[in-house]
Image: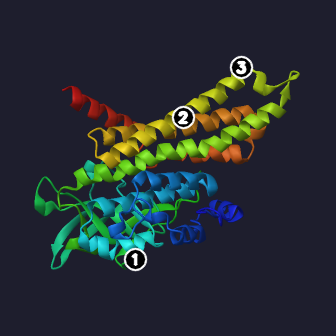
Amino acid sequence: MLFDKIDVARSACANELGILDRLTWRRLSVAGIWRRGVPERLGGDGGCWGDLADAIADASVKVDLGFALSMVAHGGFLRALVEHGNDWLHRKVLPSMMSGSIGLTALTEAQGGSDVSRCQLSGVSAEDGWRITGSKRHITNGPVADRGLILGRLPELGRRDITLFVVNLSHPSVSRGETENLAGLRSSPTGGLTFTDTPVRRQSVLGEPGNGLTTLYDVISFDRATYGLIAARWLEPQIIKAIKFARQRVAFGSPILEYEYVQGRITDAIMGVRTAEAVSRRALRALDERAADAQELCSVAKFVGTELMVKTTQDLMRVYGHAGFEESAASRAVRDALGTVIAGGTSEMQRKNVLNRYLEAVS
């Protein structure tokens, strides 16, 4: 099976060191995980993107949450190539992304944060395409990725200039910042990228030049929907473990599972997991069907899933009491969960997306 050869001790070591578990990445790639959702005509196994999202969600349990978030970043780039790439990208870039190379999507900059309208990275025309200059910050897979989808501008196009560039990150004109020392999700290397007259051929633009925002909103929607599915899968074994603890832990003469306040935390977690799973599956299905409300549903899935992870890990820590506050799996889970409400677009950004879509519908 896909995760049979996962070395749990190795994954734990990767988290401790703050590095990506490349051996596990290679093994999963060889096993064909990145062919899921890719059409057979492009070398994939067919199926739908929900199949890939399922595999990534499983990785959050079998490997760890940070590794799964690196997979989300790669999976979003992979889907972007399939859904919006041209024939050249399908032939020259997609095969390597299915066979072990690592991808990313770079949106965030030092000044604008998640506000892509303030993007400063820009390109100028060159004989064979463009040369881009600028920096990105806090990018998942930034220290380790081979290729990336880079958000930038082409000022020569006028006001409508946002463009998505597919860039070879091994080019000498690309420099990488130090891997950030994160409080959680340490097995998902995050860092900055700087581009200095980096060449981008004309075939390496995703979609149409100047139409990058329209394409981008679809690209990041897959990532957001997958977060909700990850939340459901990742939290389930933690809930089971907490229930076992609550059955054995005796206070005032009774197992603490018999007390309503503990039951309340457990049932909140169970109902939250069921909700996150249902919303995420509906969002992924809407993406596959290209439904009008797909982007809104994906933002809902991201918000519900990541906020659930934060609330549930804190609730379970309280079930464990002092033992949960010690350096432990429970306290690490809280740190990892907190990172998910920032990665992939903050919860505040998801609220903004949902409100804007709703206001458009009722105007």
Percent x, y of residue 38:
38, 62
In front of the other: 137 or 142: 142
Q: Is 303 above or below relative to 99?
A: above
Mark 1 vs 3, N-terminal side: 1
Percent x, y of residue 310:
56, 38
The residue that mark 1 highlights is 170
Amino acid beneath label 1? Ser
**What residue is rendered at 32% in x and 64% in y?**
81
Q: Is residue 324 left or right of residue 190?
A: right
**What residue is rendered at 52% in x and 64% in y?**
179
Q: Are marks 3 and 2 in contact (CB under 8 Å)?
A: no
Per the rendering, the mark at residue 260 is: 3
**What residue is rendered at 61% in x and 35% in y?**
312
Q: CA distance from mark 3 to mark 2?
A: 21 Å
Amino acid beneath label 3? Glu
Front: mark 3 or 2:
2
